[in-house]
Image (spheres, rainbow, N blue to C red):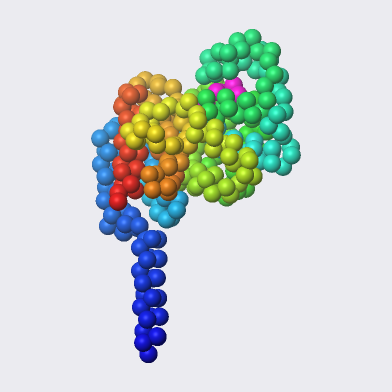
Amino acid sequence: MNVLMKRFQLLLLFLVVFLTAHVSFSQNPIEKKVLKLQLEAIMKKYRATVGLGLIHIENGDTLALNNELHFPMQSVYKFPLGLAILNQVDKGELTLDQIYHVTKKDLLDETWSPLKKKFPEGNVDLTIAELMNYSVSQSDNIACDILFKLALGTKPVNNYIHGIGITGMEIVATEHEMRADWKIQYSNWSTPMEMTHLLEGLYQKKYLSDSSNTFLMKLMVESSNDPTRIKALLPEGTIVAHKTGTSDTRGNITDACNDVGIIFLPDGTHLALSVFVCKSEENYDDTRKLIAELSKTVFDFYSKK
């Protein structure tokens, strides 16, 4: 009898330890409601339409705000484009060391392009790996459209994204096409949670080979994407693998100011976070501050001990 009692006590001890290790305070509905209210309070301070998608990758927590809306992605879509290109690399249809000869014709006018700034006359050979760096890490619009050309257009990229289960997203126009008519940016859209699921899948290595996944994560971690959004108010040294997207401002309205990424938390766990800001009437600095405040609130919530 004593032996059975000891075994029972050991079993209870094991269950207590197991549950303590695997149940976070954040799974408490009351705690999550507090977080939701905090985020909504921040959003109400700004004259903008805001969408947010959150997944705690390890414990499965999710939170979505305004997820029924379709937000223009702008350059955020260079992240799913990168996935599609690397999928073709994994299938042997492209290689990272494959050369593309950039000509003067590729260098479109009036568009963001560190590539064009460095090679104003074109006439340079760049590998797909280098084009990926320009597009994902430096948000280069010319490199982006060259990658679309190598992918045989936006349709195969869109089909790939839908094929891996991400259906709340549409990629139908190149950077050049968006520059031609500002309304076209709204045809490249995503819901906040669908982008967040894509980030989660990247971290979990659902889509690519290990080498391709590592390459894309590295581009997003080491990028020069605007650090004044998701990263701005986080503790110094916090790792964030992210991609931004920004529209022009017309008549004091910014149609898109976005940042999506994977945040590395102090306890070794990770958050996938997407923040889309649409039709902002705030100035550029305040619009980015909105994203930073939302990100910090989420980070602080999941960093509680």
Extent of the magenta region: 139-143
Q: Choose top left, top right, bottom left or bottom right for residue 82.
A: top right
From this viewpoint, is residue 184 visible?
Answer: no
Quadrant in which the N terminus appears: bottom left
| Front residue (pair 260, 3) | 3
- Which residue is outermost to the front? 2
Q: Residue furthest bottom?
A: 1
Residue at 32% over, 39% down? 296
In the rendered image, which quarter is residue 228 located in?
top left
Would you place residue 190 above or below residue 247 in this image? below
Residue drawn at 34 percent across, 48 percent down: 302
Q: Residue 21's spot in the image, x, y percent?
A: 38, 60
Using the image, determine if residue 103 lies above or below residue 79. above
Q: Nearer the viewer, residue 200 or 171?
A: 200
Residue 165 in the image: x percent, y percent?
A: 57, 50
- Vertical position of residue 15 compared to residue 195: above or below: below
> Number of callouts in the render?
0
Measured from the top left, where is residue 270 in percent x and y? 43, 46
Residue 89 lies within the magenta run: no
Magenta-drawn stretch contains 142: yes
Q: Which residue is rendered at x = 56% and y = 13% of the image?
A: 117
* Residue 236 placement, left or right of 134: left
Does the magenta stretch mainly form a helix, a strand or a loop?
A: helix
Task: Determine whether, in the image, residue 206 is placed left or right of residue 274.
Answer: right
* Residue lying furthest right: 92
Question: Can see residue 45?
Answer: yes
Query: What residue appears at the point 57 percent right and 36 percent down from the top-left corner?
Result: 216
The spot of residue 67 in percent (x, y) is 41, 46
